[in-house]
Image (spheres, rainbow, N blue to C red):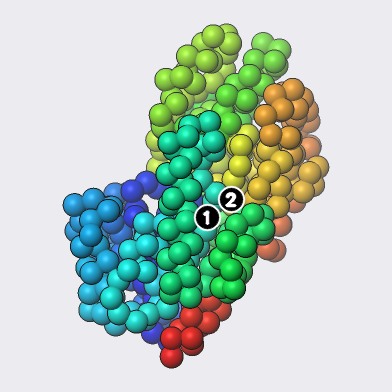
Amino acid sequence: MTGPVAIIATGELFGGAERHILGLADFLRRRDLDPRILLFSAGELADRCRDENLPVDVLQLSSAYDLAGPRRLGAWMAQHGLRVAHVHGYKATVNAALAPGRFGMVATLHGQGEPTWRKPTAYLKDRIYRTLEVLACRKLSAAVCFVTADLQQRHGAAYGSLRLATVHNGIEPMDAAAFPQRPDGLVDGRLHALMLGRLSAVKGITFMLEAMARLESGHPWQLTLAGDGPLRRDLEAQAARLGIADRVTFLGFRRDPHALLAHGDLLVMSSLHEGLPYTLLEAMSLGRPTLASDVGGLAEVLRHDETGLLVPVGDVGGFAAALDRLGRDGELRRSLGESSAREQRRAYTLEAMGEGYLQAYEAVAGARR
């Protein structure tokens, strides 16, 4: 296809979807497709776009529900001559669907949302948002891309006859040697099991704290959490109650996750569900083994005992046994890490991801023509 592509998202937080946007924009720029990024918030993603000299604008809205949003978005698309909008998240999707103008839309579904069935109000909001997202995609006959086959299987039927595709996330290969300096916060003389990301219920961190408590006191693992979130105080209190506060480090938000992975010994993802986390792909590329819940994109990407170890969701005993095994077997950690690095370079590259989206762009651009 020819012509620039608009990438639209809220930009409120910085996580996997935001890493996806940065990587994809870089790929498109190298293909001379002149991507332009439109965000609803001037946050971390906007800053990183500017750091990487990516053209980014922030829509000036009073809130995410500002009724002027669609009009301003449409005017921005027309101003820059944009004919394809790639949207991320229901707010971006709905605003694009209501915007004036004629353009094609590609929507990416990164995950299935927080588990909210115990909270009726939150559950109802989640259902409403997802329904609006589906209706918006249908209105513009969007191409809908899922980052895992698991997500497409779970949610694809809601989109009816729209064009659907699984486009796995991908990254450029990484080399641990590019991070020679040991980052602050890693305790000397310990093996580091890393958990990177927002400290929220969906990450299943409580399971890992309980698993750490089942290991003997002299075990070499140090659980190191890099990230912040609403559960930090509760998790710190839980570690103290379990008597493992000295074996758990809370680093807070860090801007050097790759250095932490390069100098760590294991990535742990005890999540209740996941799409396809960039942290997983980065750990694989850096040759670090992963211990993960057997769920969603984690189970789709990792092969048990070959590129990582998988444990049933919430199985504290299983996580404890896996930690014990990995702590005692350095050769296992090495072989899992080497196999996962090969797998990332084979199947989860930025080039493969970019080509998948180019096909989606061409499909919606052709339909509009």
User: Residue 119: in sight, yes or no?
Assistant: yes
145 over 369 or under it: above or below: above
Spatial distance from mark 2 to mark 1, Cα to Cα? 6 Å
Q: Position of residue 312 (x, y in %)?
A: 73, 35
Q: Position of residue 349 (x, y in %)?
A: 60, 64
Task: Kindly identify the residue that appears in the image at 23 percent across and 50 percent down.
Answer: 63
The numbered mark at residue 209 is none
According to the image, label 1 marks what residue? 110
Mark 1 secondary-structure assignment: loop
Q: Contact, CB < 8 Å: mark 2 with mark 1?
A: yes
203 over 95 or under it: above or below: above
Q: Quadrant of the C terminus?
A: bottom left
Q: Between residue 203 and residue 98, name the one nearer to us.
A: 98
Q: Position of residue 314 (x, y in %)?
A: 67, 29
Q: Amino acid at mark 1?
A: His
Q: Amino acid at mark 2?
A: Gly
For label 2, count other residues whose C-alpha is less than 10 Å away and answer few (under 14), some (14-19) or many (20+): many
Task: Kindly identify the residue that appears in the image at 42 percent across and 78 percent down.
Answer: 104
Q: How many numbered marks does the figure carry? A: 2
Q: Between residue 52 and residue 305, name the one nearer to us.
A: 305
Task: Kindly identify the residue that appears in the image at 27 percent across and 66 percent down.
Answer: 70
Q: Position of residue 353 (x, y in %)?
A: 57, 67
Which of the 4 quarters of the picture holds residue 105? bottom left
User: Residue 344: in sight, yes or no?
Assistant: no
Mark 2 secondary-structure assignment: loop
According to the image, label 2 marks what residue? 275
